[in-house]
Image (cartoon, helix red, strand yellow):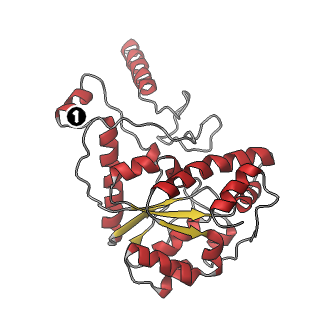
Amino acid sequence: MGVVQKGFKRRARLLREALRPPWQPAGPETNGSAFTASAGVRRPPKRTQVVDYTFPAAPRLVKSPVFVISPVRSGSTLLRMLLNSHSRIRAPHELHLRTIGVELTPGFSEASMQELGLDRVELEHVVWDRILHLELLRSGKDIVVDKTPGNVFVWERLKYVWPDARFIFLVRHPRGVVSSLENRKDNTATRESLEATALKYFAPLEKARRALDGLTVRYEQLTARPEHVTREVCTYLGVEWEQGMLEYGRHHQGQFTPNLGDRSDNIKSGQIQAARVFDDADDLPPKLAKYATAWGYA
């Protein structure tokens, strides 16, 4: 009996290794999460990945979701809480759809799904769509917004999955983004390293801004003129503006959980806090200054 159990456990371990997502290293169990803070667990890659759309798209339950395309540390949590405070808009914590994958066993589930006109990629899209649909059903609202910063790396795929998706481009002065990265708790990275991290988001964000129709929002304006900016957003989304959006602390916004959004005291205050303002790009490194100019900060 002991030998049988040992063989079964070995086969189970090998199967887990075979199905392990590429961003999750081999080692102890992680309770199903690839985003724990445990040592040795890598984050998903910060790059745009090429996807082969072999099978046609399945019908979608959500026709026109909204995606915030933004860098890290750009005020996306504030924007999502303001939107989530609207009676018709559901803007949950970061959903990280791009890291929610499907694995098919060759010769079994893979062949079965292909007979249905589905492959692994399209099954992932079906799962993503169902997640957004569940959020609408549970909230009783009719517009869903995902503000995950990682969306900048898959905006082309999101557009393919939902051809009628709407996009809000949230930008912040590059110096503000880098400064916010520097001020993170336990930060030990150099300024050059943080600037490189910011640029990984800036480049695909600007590419998306040039390729897609959408609304560009500047974080500094959102905090300085919240009514004006949220009215613009509501107009873009086709809903009436509501005063209660500005009082996001009066609404249930969910738990403040690591890797799912900002957890700073400012955001927990329930009140819109003024942003640090930088007026020019003169003393920025050229690679950052380029984006400051493109986003109207020069």
Residue 28 appears left or right of 86: right
Residue 140 place in picture, x, y as percent: 32, 72
Q: Which residue occupies the foreground of this view, 106 or 7?
A: 106
Residue 69 place in picture, x, y as percent: 52, 58
Residue 189 seen in this snapshot: no
Q: In which quarter of the image is residue 8?
A: top left
Q: Which residue is drawn at 67% across and 50% down?
A: 198
Q: Residue at x 45, y 85 (%)?
A: 242
Q: Residue furthest top?
A: 3
Residue 204 place in picture, x, y as percent: 55, 49
Q: Which residue occupies the foreground of this view, 57 or 109?
A: 57
Identify whether 222 is placed above or below 99.
Answer: below
Residue 90 appears left or right of 150: left
Label 1 CA crowd tier, 10 Å (few <14, some 14–19, many 20+): some
In the rendered image, the quadrant that contains the N terminus is top left
Which residue carries the number 1 mark? 113
